[in-house]
Amino acid sequence: MMEVPNTLIIPEAVRWSTLNQAAQQAALARPVQKTSDTLRTSVAAIIADVQERGDQAVLDYTARFDGVTLATPELPLADVQRLAAQAPASVQQAIDVAYNNIRRFHQAQIPQDQYVETMPGIHCELRFTALDSVGLYIPGGTASLPSTVLMLGIPAQLAGCRERVLISPPSQSGELTPAICYAALKCDVTRVFLAGGAQAVAALAVGTDSIPAVDKIFGPGNSYVTEAKQQVSQIAGGPAIDLPAGPSELLIIADDSAEPAFVAADLLSQAEHGPDSQVLLLSPSAQFITAVRAALAEQLAALPRQAIAQQALASSSLILTDSLDEAIAISEQYAPEHLSVQLSDAEPLLPRLTRAGSVFVGHYTPESGGDYATGTNHVLPTYGFARNYSSLGLLDFYRRYTVQRATAAGLEALGPAIIALAGEEQLDAHLRAVSLRLDSARFRSDKEAGR
């Protein structure tokens, strides 16, 4: 078994039951989420600047943060088509496979309007309508992410959102990668813009001369993007946001039936996302954790994004539990974005593992499958928000609203209950809105006519 080289820092195993409460909290503490006063103030200043200076502010921030000088933030669709054609055939084919699977899974989520007669003459409906305009934020920086284009673009396409605006930081050439452009065309994106970070979110929220304001902003990002989304959602008349989707995280529960190399690869697959990512392993087997540490060292040594993964591992934990029950309790407390369950018999435990954005079951279900092509959505709640937020789905691209109708006979039957409740709440105008109808000549005429 390979020893851990001194040049690599792999987390040491800690036994959960021997830690005091403070140490347990430290073991599960996510990397600093940068929700400091400084971050909040910086983001607020960027949003205010974009509100005031529009396109020029966006272009200035792009030059400052991305090192790219642009004449305009828009990437014309003709250029998107030109770049898409440059994507290698193997990448195009892979995107096609992923597109088909993701579309198939999300197509099954298309909502159906509901009609209910709650009592004779009282008819209630639940209706769904697509959001008119949506902003699809695609992170950039350290990686090209055509998979996120698919995860956001496919449900927007299926829902029938009229305006589907994609925005992503530019490459050093002042464009987007061919793979992103190919995926954007697959999803029928209507417009494409080059900007990232808080300034991109601000532009989608308030609008500029070039970038339209949208009804809802979707997409994951770093702490600046997450903070900006939360701030713009508080602007009067501003956009809704999908969910708090920040730096990636993975928690694995595994026993001796798992393959150490598989588990190590899964941990590193999330650690390489960014230095603020976090991965956790929970296992009742000390021997297994030791084997995973060795596999981590071996794989990390050959990883091209070693420096990034190493930083993420510095905020990660390998936790020895007294039992699987203890591991389950810890997972439910942490509420991970991704939860991998690599056990000899995982299925019976799934009803107890509900606080997760997405769950991956079995030894042959790598988390990266969900990132790319199984069909589920990879935009998921982080920071423990899996306790009360859901994974992104097709319904997030719709509004639902209700419709009700009452016949004269229906109002006659229901009216006394409305009058009694309005009287109890001392809302006399509510009461009269019913009583005037019941006492009117028109009501008596319509009732006799059966209307």
Image (cartoon, rainbow, N blue to C red):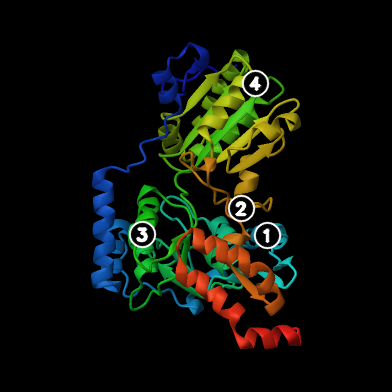
In the structure shown, which secondary structural element does the residue marked by tag 4 occupy? helix
> Toward which corner of the image does residue 107 lie, by quadrant?
bottom right
> The C terminus is located in which quarter?
bottom right
How far apart are the two marked residues, 4 and 1, measured between alpha carbons? 33 Å
How far apart are the two marked residues, 4 and 3, measured between alpha carbons? 42 Å
For label 4, the residue is 324
In the structure shown, which secondary structural element does the residue marked by tag 3 occupy? loop
Tag 1 or tag 3, which sits nearer the N-term?
Answer: 1
How far apart are the two marked residues, 3 and 1, measured between alpha carbons? 29 Å
User: In the image, what residue type sits under mark 3?
Assistant: Gln
For label 1, the residue is 106
For residue 208, above or below residue 108: below
Tag 3 or tag 4, which sits nearer the N-term?
Answer: 3
For label 2, the residue is 377
How far apart are the two marked residues, 1 and 2, measured between alpha carbons? 9 Å
Pick the front one: 294 or 330? 330
Checking the image for residue 234, the label placed there is: 3
For residue 13, above or below residue 128: above
User: In the image, what residue type sits under mark 4?
Assistant: Leu
User: In the image, what residue type sits under mark 1?
Assistant: His
| Residue 190 in sight from this viewpoint | yes
Give yes or no for contact between labels 1 and 2 (Cβ–Cβ under 8 Å).
yes
Residue 388 pos. (x, y %): 53, 44
